[in-house]
Image: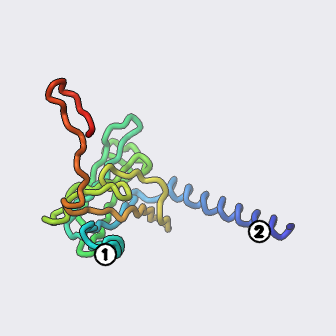
Amino acid sequence: MERTSILLIIAAASFLFMFNGVADALKKDSEVFQVGGKVLCQDCTEGWNEWVTGAKPIKGCKVSVTCLDDRSRIVHYASDLTDDAGNFEISVTKYTNGGKELKPQNCFLRLVSSPDPVCNIATDSAGGKTGVKLHRPTAVYRDIVKYVLGPFYYSTPMCDEPDTSIVDSDNGKESNY
């Protein structure tokens, strides 16, 4: 019992030191933080195994980071294209032209476009279509703070969910069928 208590105390202390290290790095870190991830094509017309494990990287997809200030105004926008392996990496300067500091938790990442003529329907898997906020950095080392998100997926038009709402021509209101 006593040994278990000591181990719990050591684990809690380790967690606190690690958390303080991340917080300190975010406070006094470099002028830049990085956002990275991967974009893949997932084809629902394939069999289950191919659909789940056979996603292929898409080259040239546009991914963006948008950062807001405390009053929800856009103060920074950056984008990047994916490479041959479907990877992207966006560097964000932590200070705007006015000298205000950008807070990573006020930034979000989303899919913008896919050049693939077959696989170009953005999905919301991992939040790629609606956008996903940056929460905790994945890596903090010396002056590097990096957020790795995703993977994000595009799919084929055949996999797109149909719009089930129709507008009633008599009263102009939308209804589901």
Question: How was the colour assigned to the protein in this rendering?
Answer: rainbow
Q: Which of the two discs, 1 and 2, labels the residue nearer the N terminus? A: 2
In this rendering, position of residue 50 left or right of residue 23: left
Quarter of the image that includes the N terminus: bottom right
The residue located at (30%, 53%) in the rendering is 129
The residue located at (32%, 67%) in the rendering is 38
Kind of residue indicated by mark 2: Leu
Q: Secondary structure at mark 2?
A: helix
> Residue 56: where, in percent of width, then height?
27, 73
> Residue 82: where, in percent of width, then height?
25, 67
In this rendering, position of residue 105 left or right of residue 168: right
Whether 108 is drawn above or below 139: the answer is above
> Residue 60: where, in percent of width, then height?
19, 66
> Residue 165: where, in percent of width, then height?
24, 40
Q: Which residue is mark 1?
A: 50
The residue located at (41%, 37%) in the rendering is 70
Q: Secondary structure at mark 1?
A: helix
Kind of residue indicated by mark 1: Glu
Q: Which of the two discs, 1 and 2, sits closer to the camera?
A: 1
In this rendering, position of residue 62 left or right of residue 141: left
The residue most toward the front is: 177
Quarter of the image that includes the C terminus: top left
The residue most toward the top is: 171
Give the CA separation, mark 1 to mark 2: 44 Å
Disc ID at residue 7: 2
The residue located at (49%, 65%) in the rendering is 140
